[in-house]
Image: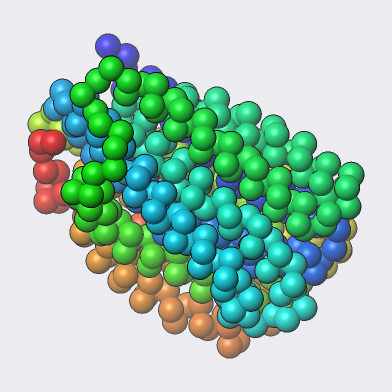
């Protein structure tokens, strides 16, 4: 049997390379659109925030199926683990269609909430086109979740590498070659999202062929999947609300602050993928060990993963400090934007070690099925964040200083989050054994 370190690496490395798909899509979009114009880059910031917020609300499609399938696999019920994935895929398609209709019909109203008229038109354009890929994105989450529960993070990796390569080519072709602007960027991303979803569904169907798993729509199973995911939905809504609120504050601090925050948030999202990959390893390993009834191993996994999270955070922070002056050049020719981005990256770099601990504890508790506690705790974290971010809204200056204070406030949010998660982990109430 491989060592625990090997198991973590075997799960986390492919998971990381898969997770970076969406941030990489946005980084490619940002880099290409940033050379089209600052207004377009700011519009992309609004549209991408809306899309990541909306799709992020349904991350439970991946997290819940990972935890459920891992527990059932740990208990020796492979068919039950696969059935959880089938129900999750049907649920993801239903939710995805509803979200797409809402986004395409209400895009101007949603963009207007950010209160920046100059970048509204490109934001609406991107949102209406890329928003059509939401069903595929949610299906990708659901299938990826059950594969993780099977402790297979390599298959999503292969699909992701192909999709990212195609996305890079299409963005350059559509935006620069054909001159489609922000619409070309959105179209390239849409094509890749649909391709990823279809590829993973085909893989899943092939793997379930010849088993006792039914691929038909089963209302009872879909409702059960939704019920299990509601606590994680609430948890994610509160978390996404904090990110959305931060972007709203950035929008009120000027175009330079908003464009700079878009770039720094894109980089932050990319860094969190490395930490979230370790969290996913924690979800799969914790779910399997609790499904097998092994609390001692669960504690051992938790201690190991927290150490991993802290040290990976140190490494990411150090790397970001090295490149914080070079990285902004890839995103904008505007000197003010570059200066603000560089300053924001310093704050992000310093917060990475603590963020590593936070993401690992979050992953362990999700894998343990501790969704109800996580939902309540995340609401508390959001409430604690409100005075911090509103202080930035009313007292921070514009430009570079605004971006710095935005990230200092968000660092305060992560501090509160880590303290609450650490308090929960020290007890035993979250370790419930069995499938």
**Image coordinates for residue 429, horizontal then vertical, percent:** 11, 51
In the shown orientation, is residue 254 left or right of residue 20?
A: right
- Residue drawn at point x = 24 percent, y = 28 percent: 213
Quadrant in which residue 258 is drawn: bottom right
In the shown orientation, is residue 127 left or right of residue 99?
A: right
In the shown orientation, is residue 257 left or right of residue 388?
A: right
**Image coordinates for residue 260, horizontal then vertical, percent:** 71, 64
Image mark count: 0
Quadrant in which residue 11 is drawn: top left
Q: Is residue 302 visible?
A: no
**Image coordinates for residue 265, horizontal then vertical, percent:** 61, 58
**Image coordinates for residue 205, horizontal then vertical, percent:** 38, 27
Q: Relative to 399, say whether 290 is above or below.
A: above
Q: Relative to 320, say whether 290 is above or below.
A: above
Outermost residue toward the bottom in this view: 394
Quadrant the C terminus occupies: top left
Quadrant the N terminus occupies: top left
Q: Relative to 250, say whether 54 is above or below.
A: above
Q: Is residue 106 visible?
A: yes
- Residue drawn at point x = 55 percent, y = 36 percent: 196
Q: Relative to 265, say whether 118 is above or below.
A: below
- Residue drawn at point x = 19 percent, y = 31 percent: 80
């Amino acid at each position: 049997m491989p060592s625990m370190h090997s198991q973590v690496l075997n799960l986390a490395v492919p998971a990381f390379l898969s997770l970076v798909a969406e941030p990489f899509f946005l980084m490619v979009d940002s880099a290409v659109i940033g050379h089209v114009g600052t207004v377009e880059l700011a519009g992309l910031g609004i549209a991408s925030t809306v899309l990541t917020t909306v799709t992020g609300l349904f991350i439970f499609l991946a997290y819940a199926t990972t935890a459920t399938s891992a527990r059932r696999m740990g208990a020796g019920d492979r068919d039950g683990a696969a059935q959880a994935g089938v129900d999750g895929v049907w649920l993801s398609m239903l939710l995805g269609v509803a979200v797409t209709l809402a986004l395409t019909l209400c895009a101007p109203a949603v963009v207007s909430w950010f209160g920046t008229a100059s970048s509204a038109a490109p934001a609406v354009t991107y949102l209406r086109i890329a928003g059509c890929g939401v069903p595929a994105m949610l299906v990708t989450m659901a299938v990826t979740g059950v594969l993780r529960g099977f402790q297979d993070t390599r298959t999503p990796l292969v699909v992701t590498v192909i999709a990212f390569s195609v996305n890079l080519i299409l963005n350059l072709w559509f935006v620069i070659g054909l001159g489609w602007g922000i619409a070309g960027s959105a179209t390239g991303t849409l094509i890749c999202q649909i391709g990823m979803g279809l590829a993973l569904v085909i893989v899943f169907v092939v793997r379930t062929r010849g088993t006792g798993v039914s691929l038909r729509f089963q209302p009872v199973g879909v409702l059960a999947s939704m019920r299990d995911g509601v606590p994680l939905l609430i948890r994610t809504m509160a978390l996404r609300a904090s990110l959305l609120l931060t972007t709203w504050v950035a929008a009120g601090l000027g175009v330079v602050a908003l464009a700079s925050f878009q770039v720094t948030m894109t980089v932050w999202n990319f860094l969190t993928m490395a930490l979230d990959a370790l969290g996913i390893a924690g979800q799969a390993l914790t779910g399997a060990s609790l499904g097998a009834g092994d609390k001692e191993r669960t504690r051992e996994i938790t201690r190991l993963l927290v150490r991993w999270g802290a040290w990976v955070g140190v490494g990411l922070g150090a790397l970001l400090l090295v490149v914080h002056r070079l990285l902004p050049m890839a995103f904008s020719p505007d000197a003010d934007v570059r200066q603000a981005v560089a300053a924001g990256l310093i704050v992000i770099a310093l917060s990475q070690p603590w963020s590593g601990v936070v993401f690992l504890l979050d992953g362990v508790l999700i894998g343990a099925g501790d969704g109800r506690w996580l939902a309540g705790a995340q609401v508390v974290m959001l409430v604690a964040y409100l005075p911090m971010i509103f202080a930035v809204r009313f007292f921070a200056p514009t430009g570079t200083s605004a971006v710095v204070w935005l990230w200092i406030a968000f660092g305060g949010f992560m501090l509160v989050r880590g303290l609450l998660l650490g308090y929960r982990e020290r007890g035993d109430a979250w370790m419930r054994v069995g499938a």
